[in-house]
Amino acid sequence: MKRDVLSMDLPELTAAVKEMGQPAYRAGQIFSWLHKSGAADFDEMTNLPKTLRETLHDNFVIFGCAIEKKLISEYDETVKYLFRLHDSEFIESVLMKYKYGWSVCVSSQVGCRMGCRFCASTMNGVVRNLAASEILSQVYAIQRDNGIRVSHIVMMGMGEPFDNFDNAMRFLELITDENGQNLSMRHISLSTCGVVPGIYKLAEKNLQLTLSVSLHAPDNALRSSMMPVNKKWPVEELIKACRDYTAATSRRISFEYALVSGVNDTPECAQKLAALLKGMLCHVNLIPVNEVDGTGMKKSAPENVKRFESYLAGKGFAVTVRRTLGSDINAACGQLRRTRINP
């Protein structure tokens, strides 16, 4: 069985290289090729002896991802990718351009088991977790394809990162390694639909990333109707975990709130949300919901979005309305894979 070299940290790679009778510095060379240069094949590692490259081929595998389909928005520079993995499963990633640089939204699972009603990723359930290498390879493949360096990463694609906690943490460790991409942890956002144990586990690590919590409703009845995860960890338990997280890390939480016409965009919902989050170190990110066939959910009218935003701002909250990117290419994750596996 060949080992997944792209998921190995430098100490693990160093130990493996020594086991092969090679000097320790070779591990640093290999790690740099993988994580700085984004090498997709051992033969690209031209400063390694040919015999060592052959040995690496025999003992290790680089799990990359192949571009199955690529859509480019006509309205902005957003690029949607459908990637084929080594086992012929499919995942999605999105490249977005902002004033501060290029941002990539990555997937952490093939599919998702959380069942949120408004999301296309979960419609066919979850197939499997992604290895850290498969999360990394999305970033590296996009950088190679566009000749760019990514400055920000959001873990908001297909899957629930806390449902794949260990691999998600290894991905964060590797993408921020100073011997590799050396991406700042402050430039990474990790999103959860509300897996409370994951919030506490992340708090223990005290990472300088941004935790984004998909809230989408201010009370249990409404949230449970939209997000089955709320039946296991209800709003009160989730908000307590969030308050405990901010107390432990001094990091502001970003609450994602997808506005659905006639469902959660009412003045009453705005009032309940303000009361729920009162006094918390947080930011509220309002998102006109992505309209996905089969969900029956429609985005809020612009005047309702503005009303909701104005109410929260009037209560002292830091609140923004997310700019819609890639609307003409179904940039919300899950839609492209869905059409591929359900033609």
Image: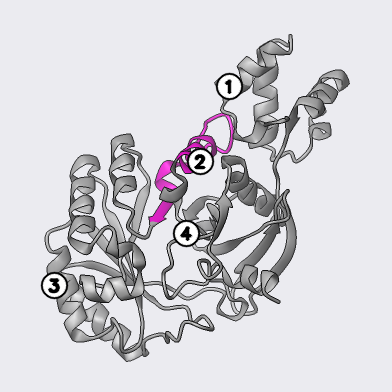
| Residue topped by disc 1 | 12
N-terminal label among 2 and 4: 4
N-terminal label among 1 and 4: 1
Question: Percent x, y for residue 148?
Answer: 65, 52
| Residue topped by disc 3 | 315
On screen, residue 174 versus residue 244, left or right, reads right
| Residue topped by disc 2 | 167
Disc 3 is placed on an element classified as: loop
Label 1 sits on what residue type? Answer: Glu
Please say if 10 is above or below 61: above
N-terminal label among 1 and 2: 1
Question: Percent x, y for residue 292?
Answer: 51, 80
Please say if 194 is above or below 61: below
Label 4 sits on what residue type? Answer: Met
From the viewer's perspective, is the residue at label 3 or at label 1 nearer? 1
From the viewer's perspective, is the residue at label 3 or at label 2 nearer? 2
Label 3 sits on what residue type? Answer: Lys
Tell me whether circle 2 and circle 4 mark residues in contact (CB < 8 Å): no
N-terminal label among 4 and 3: 4
Q: Identify which residue is drawn at 79% across, 32% down.
A: 42
Gap in Å between the C-alphas at discs 1 and 2?
15 Å
On screen, residue 152 versus residue 12, left or right, reads left
Disc 2 is placed on an element classified as: helix
